[in-house]
Image (spheres, rainbow, N blue to C red):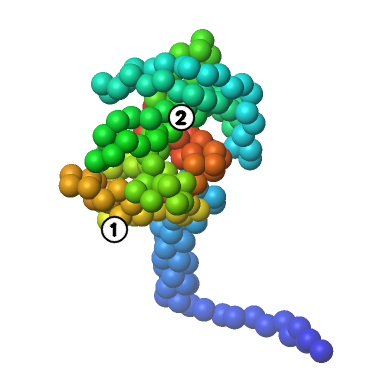
Amino acid sequence: MKLRIPATIEIDQQGLQELRALLDMLASEESSVEPVASRGDSRVDLPPRWRMVEERHGVTYTWGGDHDVYDPFRIYAAEISSGAVRLAIGRCERTRTFGQDRIYYIVVSIGPEGGMRAISEFLAADDYAETHEVIAIIKGRGGSGRQFDRPEELPSVYADWSTVTYRDRVDYPGSYLKQALVCSEQDHETMLNHSLAQIQLRHLDA
């Protein structure tokens, strides 16, 4: 059983000033607390799903001194708040990368006129033959193409994914001591979402 008893509280002018000061302090502390990010990062807009819209073979692309031939080259589409986006995943092989021939998956952004821009690359891990896992360096430190050291905090979007130190999965002299994303080569959604996050975090769409 609950009882409500009306009451009147009387305070003098000094008490009123102290009460106002307390309320101002609480309001200031509340406004200084950063909101908890939802899935991902407040700057990252990921789609609910991707759909494959086209598959090509023998697609060529030259970047960073590499002339790649992608087979297959699968194009995916999705909708985010800013509109439609298209990314493609191309599979290729490069010789003698970190001591051995390795499979690569290159994710490229496809513009409205069909132009391509490489966004991220997923390299076969040392134990690829057993795990079929691939690894990609995480960039975007300070909104740029800089990489993240350990134990620097990653953008919150990466909390949902498996991250490691790159050299833990690609152990070779000169391999990176940077943070990286690792996933199955069949996990196209993670590969696409990582690449879309990279576009937004690094302002590659500007």
- Mark 1 residue element: loop
Disc with the residue nearer the chain's start (2 vs 1): 2
Q: Quadrant of the C terminus?
A: top left
Residue sitting farthest toward the bottom: 1
Compared to residue 45, the image places residue 117 above or below, namely above
Residue flagged by tag 1: what amino acid is it? Pro
Tell me if I can see residue 156 in this picture.
no
Task: Give the class, few, some or many, for how many residues have Cα within 10 Å of label 2's Cα (few <14, many ≥20).
Answer: many
Front-most of residues 184 and 42: 184
Residue flagged by tag 2: what amino acid is it? Arg
- The percent position of residue 37, horizontal first and vertical second, equals 50, 52
Separation of residues labelled 2 and 1 (CA atoms): 31 Å
Compared to residue 43, the image places residue 154 above or below, namely below
- The percent position of residue 74, horizontal first and vertical second, equals 55, 26
Task: Give the class, few, some or many, for how many residues have Cα within 10 Å of label 1's Cα (few <14, many ≥20).
Answer: few
Q: Could you tell whether 9 is left or right of 100 in the image?
A: right
Q: Which mark is in front, 2 or 1?
A: 2
Q: Could you tell whether 28 is left or right of 98 in the image?
A: right
Q: Could you tell whether 91 is left or right of 138 in the image?
A: right
- Mark 2 residue element: strand
Front-most of residues 76 and 157: 76
Query: What residue is shown at x 47% (from left), y 17% (from top)?
Result: 59
Disc number placed over residue 62 in the picture, else none: none
Residue that carries the numbered disc 1 in the rendered image: 151
Q: Quadrant of residue 75?
A: top right
Residue that carries the numbered disc 2 in the rendered image: 91
Query: What residue is shown at x 22% (from left), y 47% (from top)?
Result: 172
Front-most of residues 179 and 122: 122
Tell me if I can see residue 127 in this picture.
yes
- The percent position of residue 183, horizontal first and vertical second, equals 47, 47
**Contact? badges 2 and 1 (CB < 8 Å):** no
